[in-house]
Image: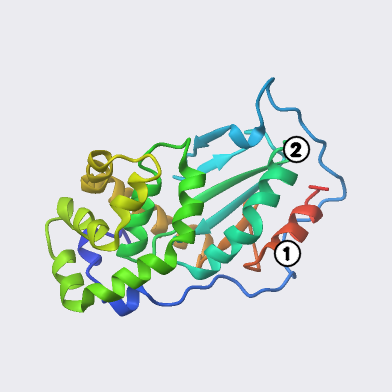
Amino acid sequence: MRKSLSLLPISLALALSACGGGADTAENGVSSSESAEAVEAPDGQKWSETVSKTDAGGVVMGNPNAPIKLVEYMSITCSHCKDFGEQAFAPLRDNYVDSGRVSFEVRNFVRDPLDLTAAILSRCGGEGPFFPLTEQALSNQGAMFEKAQGMGEATYTNILQSAPDKRFVRLAEQLGLITFFQQRGISEDQAKACLANTETAETLMNNTQKAVEEYNIEGTPTFLINGQKIDGTNWAIVETKLKEAGAR
């Protein structure tokens, strides 16, 4: 079933609901009997500086031919995704992606209109700044939720009942997100143009529905290693699975 913009007017309480992926266990995953070899990046570059869009609608960092491919389905409004980002982004980049052994792809799994608004803005500058913008947006959760709660249910509902090319602009203004991203290199005009592009919102929601159908994603964060879903939402478990796959 396709998601459409008509499905977005959900309650503010639901938009601020909890998130969670698989259980924090290390029972399932990808194993390998061999260690992957390190691969040198092109001269003068780091693999973590190699960033591109993927056919699945994500953004991938690292060696495009890395033997170990880590994918995270994440939501900017998910506290567990925020925790993972704080635990994992630096060691994942420095110890695994820059070795050329692992590529890291983030696919937005939009849970609610707040998440969708932030996801649109994190992509507004293209793939280059996507990872730092996403990391900073995750860190901004508390401020965003505070502003969301302050707007009240009536204002929230009114915004989501506005025209599709206006609702995310209005929501971003209420959440302080246009100013937040403007301070990080996305101009106000650029942000508003991205938020008014209904095709972007439709694509993100359709990609989320495809993830549900293909991988039975039930919560975020959810991780794939070489196309196989693993259990666990924290860095300790994901790192163990990467090592089992050969990322030693």
Q: How many marks?
A: 2
Question: What residue is at 39 percent from the left and 66 percent from the top?
Answer: 143
Question: What residue is at 47 percent from the left and 67 percent from the top?
Answer: 78
In terms of secondary structure, where does tag 2 sit? Answer: loop
- Position above or below: 44 against 154: above
Image location of residue 122, percent across then percent down? 40, 48
The residue most toward the front is 183
Which of the two residues, 244 or 120, is positioned nearer the viewer here? 120
Question: What residue is at 75 percent from the left and 70 percent from the top?
Answer: 27
Q: Is residue 220 left or right of residue 112?
A: right
Question: What residue is at 30 percent from the left and 69 percent from the top?
Answer: 147
Earlier in the chain: of badge 2 and badge 1, it is: 2
Q: Are marks 2 and 1 in contact (CB under 8 Å)?
A: no
Q: Badge 1 is on which residue? A: 236
The amino acid at mark 1 is Ala
Crowd class of label 2 (few under 14; some 14 to 19; many from 20; radius 10 Å): many
Which of the two residues, 178 or 210, is positioned nearer the viewer here? 178
Which of the two residues, 30 or 192, is positioned nearer the viewer here? 192
Q: Badge 2 is on which residue? A: 99
- Residue 86 showing in the rendered view: yes
The N terminus lies in quadrant:
bottom left
- Residue 77 showing in the rendered view: no
Image location of residue 230, percent across then percent down? 66, 63
* Quarter where residue 103 is shown: top right
Q: Is residue 219 left or right of residue 47?
A: left
The amino acid at mark 2 is Ser
The Cα atoms of the two marked residues, 2 and 1, are separated by 19 Å
- Position above or below: 53 against 1: above
In terms of secondary structure, where does tag 1 sit? Answer: helix
Q: Is residue 37 left or right of residue 41?
A: right
